[in-house]
């Protein structure tokens, strides 16, 4: 009786080329070196600044205003609220309340409803009315031009002071540190501090805010669209 011949187990051709994977773009040696340089290394910071200039050369405050007082009020209203929403409210708000006197002696319950869409409207009403009265009584109806004086206004902290002084008066007294700047300063390793006052001492301005709003989002940063990706070594990168 004839026996069936056993089939030899097939072996993979070791010389066969492996399936090719999509090649990732190579980073230049300079980019890799800068990406792993200490956060505040002068060359790395200069590279980040250059990238911010490239992407947001015309960055400025996005709160619409016609004068320093309107900017002050809008900045107070922007706490825990988007600039887009504040601008929507401002379209009718400043027609109804055109100057500090109108805000200072407004009917609180009515003003609350006028600014309600910005959130925290009761506290904001107190701050807006208090700041307006102080401007009339202490500063002759004009928003003060120094950080020391502007911080005496109710509802005004350093962030608001820096926005008004820098944008309305062109006085570089400091850096605006909002939630976007706090987030990016940590991700880009530009500051190890969490206190806005201390972070302010380390940073630069509106370009970080624009980058935070447009690309480096809190939950899902668009790292694939970021022109600073090669300089960033944040743990929560998405690429």
Image (cartoon, helix red, strand yellow):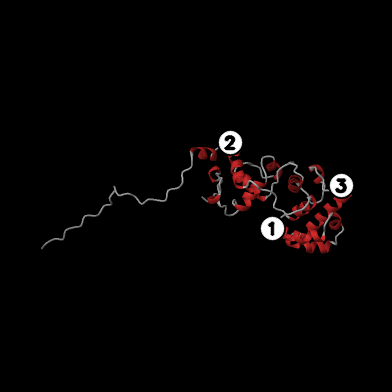
User: Could you tell me which residue is drawn at 80 percent across and 60 percent down?
Assistant: 95
Q: Position of residue 88 (x, y in %)?
A: 72, 60
Q: Position of residue 81 (x, y in %)?
A: 70, 57
User: Could you tell me which residue is drawn at 49 percent across and 38 percent down?
Assistant: 29
With respect to residue 121, does 147 lie above or below? above
> Is the N terminus in the top left, top right, bottom left or bottom right quadrant?
bottom left
- Which residue is identified by label 1? 84
Q: Position of residue 154 (x, y in %)?
A: 81, 51
Decide which of tag 2 and tag 1 comes sooner along the chain.
2
- Which residue is identified by label 2? 43
CA separation in Å, label 3 and label 2: 44 Å
Image-based side of 11 in relation to 26, left or right: left
CA separation in Å, label 3 and label 1: 30 Å
Residue at the right extreme of this rendering:
137
Q: Secondary structure at mark 3?
A: helix
Q: Secondary structure at mark 1?
A: helix
- Which residue is identified by label 3? 139
């Amino acid at each position: 009786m004839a026996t069936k011949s056993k089939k030899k187990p097939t072996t993979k051709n070791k010389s066969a080329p492996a399936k090719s994977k999509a090649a990732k773009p190579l980073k230049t040696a300079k980019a890799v070196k800068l990406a792993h340089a200490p956060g505040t290394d002068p060359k790395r910071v200069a590279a980040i600044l250059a990238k911010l200039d490239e992407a947001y050369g015309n960055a400025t405050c996005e709160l619409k205003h016609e004068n320093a007082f309107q900017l002050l009020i809008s900045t107070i209203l922007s706490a825990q609220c988007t600039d887009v929403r504040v601008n929507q409210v401002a379209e009718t708000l400043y027609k109804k309340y055109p100057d500090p006197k109108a805000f200072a002696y407004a009917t609180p319950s009515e003003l609350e409803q006028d600014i309600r869409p910005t959130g925290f409207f009761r506290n904001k009403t107190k701050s807006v009315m208090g700041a307006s009265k102080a401007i009339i009584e202490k500063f002759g109806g004009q928003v003060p031009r120094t950080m020391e004086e502007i911080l005496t206004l109710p509802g005004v902290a350093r962030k608001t002071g820096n926005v008004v002084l820098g944008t309305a008066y062109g006085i570089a007294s400091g850096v605006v540190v909002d939630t976007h700047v706090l987030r990016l300063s940590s991700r880009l390793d530009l500051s190890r501090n969490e206190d806005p006052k201390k972070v302010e001492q380390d940073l630069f301005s509106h370009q970080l805010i624009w980058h935070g709003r447009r690309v480096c989002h809190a939950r899902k940063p668009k790292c694939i669209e970021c022109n600073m990706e090669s300089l960033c070594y944040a743990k929560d990168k998405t690429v």
